[in-house]
Image (cartoon, rainbow, N blue to C red):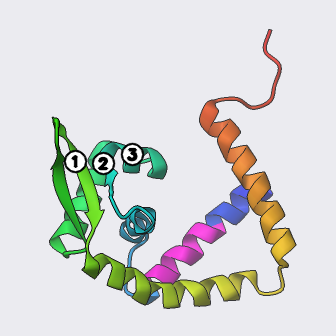
């Protein structure tokens, strides 16, 4: 129950913080995923990482493309696939947002040690992996 309550509070708090910084959450998350991928990601790869349907992600990417933050390119050899690449304006947007993000992280994690954060991340990652795989640790007949 504590995880559900915390997740709900986290989502509401983050939404407010994003709005106060002039952003909505989902487009910035797309940019975060692309930030460490200078060669870009396919729409399918991005969809898997974000756990979003292709249609929902396509709308987000189109919005980011209209704003000049990303560009879409047809994949060579597979005209059905799109490669999504972050543009310089997207990198600038990420740098500007990171100032707000750093402040948000400092406020919410103030008083929590690096060791505790690392342990919490390990636990959440393990649980998320089990849930994504459809395994819950229960023995099946």
Q: Image point 70% across, 56% down: which residue?
A: 4
How far apart in space, not on screen, are marks 3 and 1 (Cα)? 10 Å
How far apart in space, not on screen, are marks 1 and 2 (Cα)? 6 Å
Q: Secondary structure at mark 1?
A: strand
> In the picture provided, is 71 more to the left or to the right than 25?
left
Q: Is the Cβ of the residue at disc 2 closer than 8 Å to that at disc 3?
A: yes
Instruction: Report the residue marked by disc 1.
Output: 82
Instruction: Report the residue marked by disc 2.
Output: 43
The image quadrant of residue 119 is bottom right
Residue 50 seen in render: yes
The image quadrant of residue 9 is bottom right
- Segment tinted magenta in the rendering: 9-19
In the image, residue 10 sits, relative to residue 17, either above or below, namely: above
Residue 54: horizontal and vertical position, in percent?
31, 44
Q: Image point 68% across, 87% down: which residue?
A: 106
Q: Image point 70% across, 29% down: which residue?
A: 135
How far apart in space, not on screen, are marks 2 and 3 (Cα)? 6 Å
N-terminal-most mark, 3 or 1:
3
Q: Is the Cβ of the residue at disc 1 closer than 8 Å to that at disc 2?
A: yes
N-terminal-most mark, 1 or 2:
2
In the image, residue 125 sits, relative to residue 97, either above or below, namely: above
Q: Secondary structure at mark 3?
A: helix
Residue 31, label in figure: none
In the image, residue 3 sits, relative to residue 97, either above or below, namely: above
Give whichever of 29, 81 is nearer the camera: 81
Instruction: Report the residue marked by disc 3.
Output: 45
Placement of the C terminus among the 4 image quadrants: top right
Q: Residues within 10 Å of mark 2 (few under 14, many from 20)?
A: some
Q: Residues within 10 Å of mark 3 (few under 14, many from 20)?
A: few
Residue 123: horizontal and vertical position, in percent?
79, 53
> In the picture provided, is 130 more to the left or to the right than 82?
right
């Amino acid at each position: 129950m504590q995880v559900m309550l915390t997740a709900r509070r986290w989502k509401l708090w983050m939404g407010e913080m994003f709005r106060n910084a002039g952003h909505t959450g989902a487009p910035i998350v797309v940019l975060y995923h692309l930030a460490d991928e200078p060669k870009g990601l396919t729409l399918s790869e991005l969809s898997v990482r974000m756990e979003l349907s292709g249609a929902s992600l396509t709308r987000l990417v189109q919005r980011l493309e209209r704003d000049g933050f990303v560009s879409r390119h047809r994949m060579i050899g597979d005209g059905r696939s799109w490669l999504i690449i972050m543009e310089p304006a997207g990198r600038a947007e990420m740098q500007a947002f990171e100032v707000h993000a750093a402040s948000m992280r400092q406020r919410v994690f103030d008083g929590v040690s690096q060791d505790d954060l690392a342990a919490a991340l390990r636990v959440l990652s393990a649980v998320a992996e089990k849930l994504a795989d459809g395994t819950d640790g229960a023995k099946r007949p």
